[in-house]
Amino acid sequence: MEKEKFEYLDSMSNLQEIEISKEDFNFAQKDANIHDVKIKSKPVTFFKDAMKRFVKNKSSVAGGVILGLIIVGAIIGPEVMPRFGCYDVSTTHVTSADGVKSEIYLPPKLFDAGSGFFDGTISKTGILYDQENNQPVGYDLRTVSNVVTSEEYLNQAAPYGTGGFINLTYNSISTEEIADFYSYKYDYDFTNDYTIEYRFVKPYISGYKDAKYRISLMTLVGKEKTYYPLTGSDLTYTPFTQATDTKVGFVSTLFDKKEEGTLTINVTDVMSHYGLTELPAGRINIDILTDREGDKSSIFIEKLAINSTSDTSTDSVSLRGIKDANDCTIQEQKISEDGKIDKVFNKKYWTALSSSRSVLDIKFVKCNFTYDIYEDCYGVKEMKIAAYKVNEWINTGLIEYDPSGGATDDKAVLASRYKSLSSKDPIVEIVRQEGTPIWDMEEKNYTGFYLYCNISQYKYLGYPYKPRYLFGTDQYGRDYLKTILTSLRLSLVLAFGCALLNIFIGIVWGSISGYFGGIVDITMERFCDIVSGLPSIAIITLCLLHLKNDMLAFIISMFMTGWMGVAGRTRTQFYRYKGREYVLASRTLGARDGRLIFKHILPNAVGTIITSSILMIPSVIYSEASIAYLGLGLKGQLMFGVILTENSTIFQGYTMYLLFIPTIIMAFLLVSFNLFGNGLRDAFNPSLKGED
C-alpha cells in the first residue's frame, strides 16, 4: 500500500520526515459495541468502609484492644474471682480476730517469699533490736530474714537500750554543797555477806567537771538520816547524821573513760567495824560534793552493783544496785496509776535530792531486715483458743478433743486427747491446756478451759489455701485487684450510661438548633447559656441537700449539664454542612427535614462528635473523684474515682501501690479512649471514604 510522507520539526528545530500507511493503525474493538463496563466488585456500606479504615489505624486498634481488655476484665473479673475472706469486697477486714493479724495493707504478691520481686515482703530499716531475745522489737522471728544489725549510742534512756552512764550533777540553788542519790530501802542482815562493786568515770563532756563523791549506807528515821561511809582515801568509819555534818570520806573519780577496772567493797566488814549486825530499811547512798564554781560538778556512774552469796531471800538485795545505767533510769521513769512515780513497788528506784540526772552513751542496736507480711498474717502462730471455739470446731467436724483430763502441758497427753478430722483443721500443735473443764448439761460440751495452740492462721480465717493478692490489699483489708475491678465496673457502667444519654440529648438538641437556626437557635442557645452558667459543684451540692442520696444526686448532676458540650459541637457541624450542595440538591428533590438531618448532615458530622464525646466516659470517673475529694458525697462507695481519691495522699512507703495501680489504670483508660476516639473520627469521616 502506498505510504504518505509527513514532515515535522523536532525539539531541536531539525526537519524530520516519516512515512505512514493505513496498515499502521488497527481498531481494538472493530466489531464490538462501545458501552460502560459493569463494576464487578461488591458495593461497600458506610460502616464496613469505616471499619476497614479503623483497622488500618494501628494505634487506634491498640487503644481499642487495651480498652476492651479493661472493660472485659471489669465485667468478668469480679465474677470469676473467689468470694471468701479478703476477696469479699462488700465488707471490711480491718479488726483482728482473736489475735490474728489484720489483713490490711498486704503488699502485692505473685511469687514465693525470697524471690525479691512481687514476693509479699518489704524492707524494714532502722528498727530497734531486742538484744536479750535476739530479734527485732515487735516482730516475730518467723517473719524476718536477712537481718543486719548496727550499733548506735544516744544520750537518752529507753527500752531495749543497754549500758551507758548515769550523769549525776549537783544543781541545788540552796547553800548546801552536798547532794544525795540513794536506793530503795532494804533490811540488811550482816550475818550475811554483802559486797558492792562499783565503777565511776571522770566527766568527758564539756560543761562538766570532776566532783568528789562518797558511798555510804544510810538509814532514815523520821526526817533524820544517819550515814555510814563505806570507802574513801581518808575513811575514818565515823557515822554522821546529815550529809552537811562532815566531808569525811569524799574521794575523786576513780577512772578515766577508757580505763578498765572495778572496785569492790566488803560491806559486811565495814558494818562490823561500826558494830552493826543489821540495818533495817537501809539504803545505799551516794553523796556529791561541789565547789559551786564554774562548770557543773558531776560524777558518771557506770556500775554500782550490790551482791550477796548468802542472802537468798525473795526480796533480793541485788535489785537495789545499778548494774545498767539505762535499766536504772527506765525504772525511775515508771509511773503508777495515780500518775506519780511508783516508788512503792519499784525495787530498782533511786531517789535524787539537790541533783539532776541524765544518761550518756546508751547503746542501742538497730537492724535492717526483710519482713514477710504474709507469713505474719497467715503463717503458724501460737494463739489462746477459748472453749467456745474448740466446741465450734468439734461440732463442725474439724477435730475431736477431750478436755476432761484437766490442765496439762504434757505434749504426749495433749496429743492423745486430740484428733484432726479435716484438712481445714487450723491446729498444728496443742502446747498446753489451762483451766478446769466444766460439763455443760444443756449444751452437751465442756466450758471453762483454754488451749494454747500453734495455729495455721489462714485456716483459722477460713481460707482453703494461703492467699496471694496480685495487687495486695487496701486499708480496708479487701483484695485490691477485685476492689479495683468491681469499682471500675460500676464506674464504667455509670459512665457509659451517662455518656450515651448525654450524647443522645446533645445530638438531638444541637441538630435542631443548628439546622433550623434563627429564633429557634437563639432561644435554645440562651437556655444553654443560663444552665451552663451554673457551677457544677453548686448543682451537685443542691442535689445532695435535696435528694439525700449521693449516687442519685451524682447521676442527676451528670445529666443536667453533661449534654451541652455535645450539643454545641453538633450545632457547629450543622452550620458547617447544612449549606452544602448535596443538601440543597436533596431539599430540591423533596427531602424532608428529618431525612436531611439524619441522612445527609449528621453522618458527615458524626466523626468530630464521636471524638469529642468519647472522652466524656473518663471525665465521669474524674467527676466521681472530685466530688469525693471535696467531701460532697460518694465517700465509701465502691467506685473507681472514689478509690483514686481515698489513696491520693499516699506518697511514701510500700503502700504507694494503692496510689500507683489505679493511677496507671486511669492513665491507660484515658490514653486508650483518646486513641480509640481518634480512630473513630477518621473512620466515620465521609470525606475519607474509599481511601486506603
Image: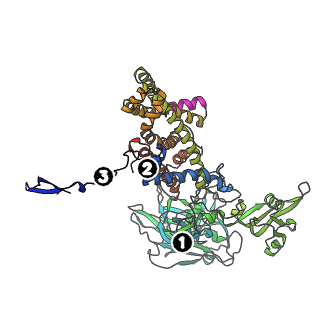
Give the CA distance from mark 1 to mark 3: 98 Å
Observer-nearest residue: 74 or 653? Answer: 74
Q: Nearer the viewer, mark 2 or mark 3?
A: 3
**Can you identify the residue that label 1 sits on?**
147
Relative height, residue 351 to residue 214 (above, below): above
Observer-nearest residue: 386 or 596? Answer: 596
- Say if mark 2 contacts mark 3, CB within 8 Å: no
Q: Is residue 665 magenta?
A: no
**Disc 3 crowd, CA 10 A, few/some/many (<14, 14-19, 20+):** few
Q: Earlier in the sequence, mark 2 or mark 3?
A: 3
Residue farthest top in this picture: 519
Give the CA distance from mark 2 to mark 3: 42 Å
Looking at the rendered structure, the kind of residue marked 3 is Phe
Observer-nearest residue: 650 or 673? Answer: 673
Give the CA distance from mark 1 to mark 2: 60 Å
Q: Secondary structure at mark 2?
A: helix
Q: Quadrant of residue 405?
A: bottom right
**Can you identify the residue that label 2 sits on?**
53
Which mark, by number, is residue 27?
Answer: 3
Q: Secondary structure at mark 3?
A: loop
Left or right for 15, reference 290: left
Looking at the rendered structure, the kind of residue marked 2 is Arg
Residue 36 lies, in percent from the top left, at: 39, 45
Which mark, by number, is residue 423?
Answer: none
Residue farthest front in this picture: 1
The region drawn magenta spans 537-548
